[in-house]
Amino acid sequence: MKAVTWQGKRDVRIEDVPDPRIEQPTDAVIRVTSSGLCGSDLHLYEVLTPFMTPGDILGHEPMGIVEEVGPEVTHLKPGDRVVVPFQIACGHCYMCGTGLPTQCETTQVTGEGMGAPLFGYTRLYGAVPGGQAEYLRVPQAQYGPIKVPEGPADDRFVYLSDVLPTAWQAVEYAAVPEGGSVAVLGLGPIGDMACRIARLKGVDKVFGVDLVPERLERARARGVETFDLRSFDKEKDLVAAVQDRTGGRGPDAVIDAVGTEAHGGAVAKLVQQTAAVMPRAIGSPLAERFSIDRLAALYTAIDLVRRGGTISLSGVYGGMADPMPMLTMFDKQIQLRMGQANVRRWSDDIVPYLTDGDPLGVDGFATHHVPLTEAPQAYEMFQKKRDGAVKVLMKP
């Protein structure tokens, strides 16, 4: 089959690889019909190269048609249409039972000290072959795949794999009080969808911050009050402008949907780039033990949120030596919630909004649809924010 493979920094290629097969009784194999390109994929494309191996198959936002199931997968059959969550979890351990499948005790990548494995990601999360491919082996298929109905195009359901539950959890973790306000930093796919979900949940004051014109316009069209970073000379000017809209107090919650790709932090950028070009035996430990994120967005969130407010982190951070302004966080009594989205915890809440109309606008959410064979060009376009690329879907 053909698949998108990682070959090095900013180097992804379409290659012929062996077809997946059933290896465990809880496996399924699906024929992929759509697969998303995620901002997290750009971390592999640019930042997390020390943890990758040439030939790794990328992608963690797939959906498709079941081709084959193992004997212990009883709720699926060939021909079923399914969305595959980006994490691999068993559904029956303590952590899964408490709504934290990202911490699944059956599948944890214990050798790396990490939680549940992820499709198409680094060795820290199991280096499991991903879904930017013609076919995908799905471990723990007795729990993971979400059956969806026939009829609507893939665009209606594919975001259940990552975008929708990640944005949903970001809003849930933000815990915006009734009549309150939330600011969303970064209006890429997750930030954009978080704004839509906050509005859906009745939050009247939703502020969106970005610097890409197309992203700002998309958010404004959904009733979000936007702030263009290019209009402010200093971060404190942006903070003051948003605080002016909240009685001088600041929003009740801030969602950081940017993560480590935030602009700024020359030292952090230097460490990341140095680790990326070192030999793997040296660069990997450096990146793992001494990595520093570019924390511009998180620092802004800390300054922006009101005293006693909540910061919800959905953007990916991976630093082990990040300097945090603990004095300010303690003094402001900030609550901080974060983590990979627990897809199956939220999927049952989300599905009704996909089967009874389209209040979240998922049908038109993708800006680009490309064949799988154009993945290298799609990665470059998305990474450079060209051609108004906000969300890219690939079809084998």
Image (cartoon, rainbow, N blue to C red):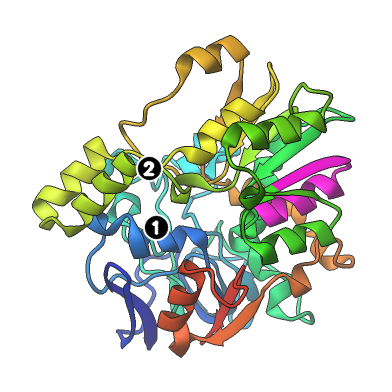
Q: Which mark is residue 113?
A: none
Q: With respect to residue 273, does 233 lie above or below?
A: above
Q: Is residue 226 left or right of residue 121?
A: right
Q: Say which amino acid is labelled 1.
A: His
Q: Which quadrant holds residue 388?
A: bottom right
Judged from the image, the secondary structure of the residue bearing numbered disc 1 is: helix
Judged from the image, the secondary structure of the residue bearing numbered disc 2 is: loop
Task: Residue 184: give x, y in percent of width and height.
Answer: 68, 43
Task: Residue 383: give x, y in percent of width and height.
Answer: 46, 67
Task: Residue 145: give x, y in percent of width and height.
Answer: 58, 64
**Residue closer to the observer: 379 or 67:** 379
Which residue sits at x=62%, y=83%? Answer: 79
**Residue closer to the observer: 197 or 32:** 197
Report the Cα–Cα distance between label 2 and label 1.
10 Å
**Residue closer to the observer: 312 or 274:** 274
Which residue sits at x=78%, y=79%? Answer: 152
- Pointer 1 residue: 43
The 10 Å Cα crowd at callout 1, few under 14, some 14 to 19, many 20 or more, is: many
Which residue sits at x=48%, y=39%? Answer: 296
The image quadrant where one finds the N terminus is bottom left
Q: With respect to residue 182, does 370 lie above or below?
A: below
Q: Say which amino acid is labelled 2.
A: Gly
Q: Is residue 134 visible?
A: no
Q: With respect to residue 172, does 13 lie above or below?
A: below
| 204 is within the stretch colored magenta | yes
Label 1 near label 2: C-beta < 8 Å?
A: yes
Q: Which quadrant holds residue 304?
A: top right
In the rendered structure, which segment of residues is drawn in magenta?
191-208
Which residue sits at x=70%, y=30%? Answer: 240
Q: Which mark is residue 318?
A: 2
Q: Is residue 184 left or right of residue 386?
A: right
Q: Mark 2 or mark 1, which has the lower sequence index? A: 1
